[in-house]
Image: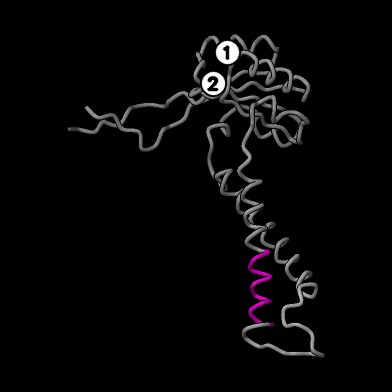
Amino acid sequence: MAHQAPQGPFPYGIVAEFDTPEDLKRSANAARERGYTKMEAYSPFPIHGMEDAVGYKDFRIKWIIFGCACVGAVVGLGMQYWWAVIDYPMNVGGRPLFSWPQFVPVTFECTILASAFGAVFGMLGLNGLPKPYHPIFEAPNFERASQDRFFLLIEAHDPIYDRFETKRFLEEFQPLKISELEAEEEGHHEVA
């Protein structure tokens, strides 16, 4: 059984460059209605409703933050309980060792701290950051995505992607430019 590495670049997708956020949102909505599911929008600022337009429905970060908040609350309360009741109990004025109102501020702060760490590291992990290279970086004028241009990428692994039909579809929205992107697939081997 011989492994053979494929030669040449592989199609990654087609990217369209727009001048306004309205054009980007309009084309993304139309692409979603047409049936495209694997697409990304790039913009210098958040555009209201763009998540729905590109079909972004990932709720994992919310659950990561919630889980970290719960862990932070349990650790904060448990740490104080351990110190006040088990490790170094001090009976002051006949009060109970576990008087929960005094534990609320530290528990709250541990909850906030853990959820903030969960948000930052969860976002970095789910976005695959840091990402020193991505095929979209090769799109003409893509450096303007952080300034004044708007890009819609329809990826080649979309179930209804067709190189010519997708390009023709994007041309209907009169973008400033349409470009085809290529990517080298690492680790892709065919068994002969």
Rendering coords of residue 179 (x, y %)? 58, 20
Quarter in which the C terminus is drawn = top left
Q: Judging from the image, what secondary structure is the residue with disc 1 in?
A: helix
Residue type at the position of mark 2? Glu
Q: Main secondary structure of the magenta part?
A: helix
Q: Nearer the viewer, residue 98 or 191?
A: 98
Number of disc labels: 2
| Residue 180, label in figure | 2
Q: Is residue 93 above or below residue 32?
A: below
Q: Is residue 59 above or below residue 66?
A: above
Magenta span includes 79: yes
- The residue at 65%/15% (across/down) is 33
Q: Residue furthest left?
A: 1
Rendering coords of residue 187 (x, y %)? 36, 38
Looking at the rendering, the stretch of residues picked out in magenta corresponds to 73-84
Residue count near mark 1 (Cα–Cα under 10 Å), binned few <14, some 14–19, many ≥20: some
Quarter in which the N terminus is drawn = top left
Q: Which residue is mark 1?
A: 167
Q: Residue furthest right?
A: 93
Residue type at the position of mark 1? Lys
Q: Is residue 89 above or below residue 27?
A: below
Residue count near mark 2 (Cα–Cα under 10 Å), binned few <14, some 14–19, many ≥20: many
Magenta span includes 2: no
- The residue at 69%/82% (across/down) is 84
